[in-house]
Image (cartoon, rainbow, N blue to C red):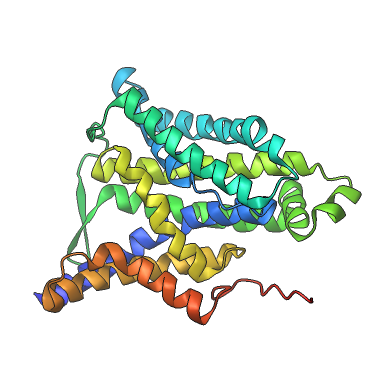
Amino acid sequence: MQSQLLLQLIINGLIIGTLYGVVGMCFVLIYKASQVVNFAQGEFLLIGAWVCWWLLTAWNIPFFWGFLIAVVFMMAFGMAVQMVILRPLIGEPIISVIMVTIGMSIFFQALMKWMFGTFAQPFPPIFPVDKVNVLGLQVQTAYLMSTGVSLAIMAGFAWFFKYSKMGLAMRATAFSQQVAQSLGISVRQVFALSWGISAAVSAVAGVVVGMVNGVSSALSYFGIKVFPAVILGGLDSIFGAVVGGLIVGLLENLGQYVDSQYLKWGNLYEIIPFYVLIIILMIKPYGLFGTRDIERV
């Protein structure tokens, strides 16, 4: 029974780790483009999940179309946030912009509570079966869907940054905004698109988690849990975000196994990502794949 439980937790860890990796890529995307850490990322998950839930329950829209509309809405919403709230702060100290993202986080969470209440709301039934058998273990159908979608998003990110014109423009902007402008790249357009893509991808994660756990303000905490994965992989590394997400997902579930079988602390699952964050910052401040920033004074 213990070996079966361990295998179940490892599979769960890999599945949730891919989701962490996808949300982690959103952090990295914004940071690489604008050098800003978006502490409202968890609220993007929350808003996307609420929009999809509202479309399905209030308007009886089929899940596929409701999901697609929510993603498109969040992309437009993310671009609007950048253009209306953050664009006027270009040139201001980075700490000012970070504090604005924290303020947005508090505001959006309060707004969602005012609009939809404080109680968790379940998604209507979407799949014919809630769980499927994988290697003799029961796995949530929503998580299997999320794994496929997450892998597709990762592949899409790889193609986008390597071959698309806008992806190359984002890479140039991340390298040097001045050089990018001298090449005729619209830095403002790159900033807006990076926030739009980040919000849209976050909506995907929010809907998946909402299908399993219900939609409530607690969903925004998912963004904070992903932050250790981003630091672990390297704040400016897309590949590092994916690796960091998988590592944190596995550590969470292995921590739950050790806690339930041996330690009996009761909260190791929740706090182990932050233990990892502290240790990584002490040993490798730039993460596993982050770029070392050498300053000469």
Where does the C terminus fall, quadrant-wise?
A: bottom right
Classify residue 295 by image quadrant. Answer: bottom right
With respect to residue 265, does 157 lie above or below? above
- Residue 294: x, y in percent? 73, 76
In this rendering, the count of numbered labels is 0
190 to the left or right of 102: right
With respect to residue 41, does 261 lie above or below? below
- Residue 172: x, y in percent? 78, 56
Q: Residue furthest left?
A: 1
Classify residue 17 by image quadrant. Answer: bottom left
- Residue 23: x, y in percent? 47, 53
- Residue 76: x, y in percent? 58, 30
Q: Residue at x 39, y 35 (%)?
A: 109
With respect to residue 142, does 239 lie above or below? below
Name the residue nearer the viewer: 3 or 109.
Answer: 109
Q: Residue at x 37, y 44 (%)?
A: 220
With respect to residue 5, does 96 lie above or below? above
Where does the N terminus fall, quadrant-wise?
A: bottom left
Name the residue nearer the viewer: 43 or 16.
Answer: 43
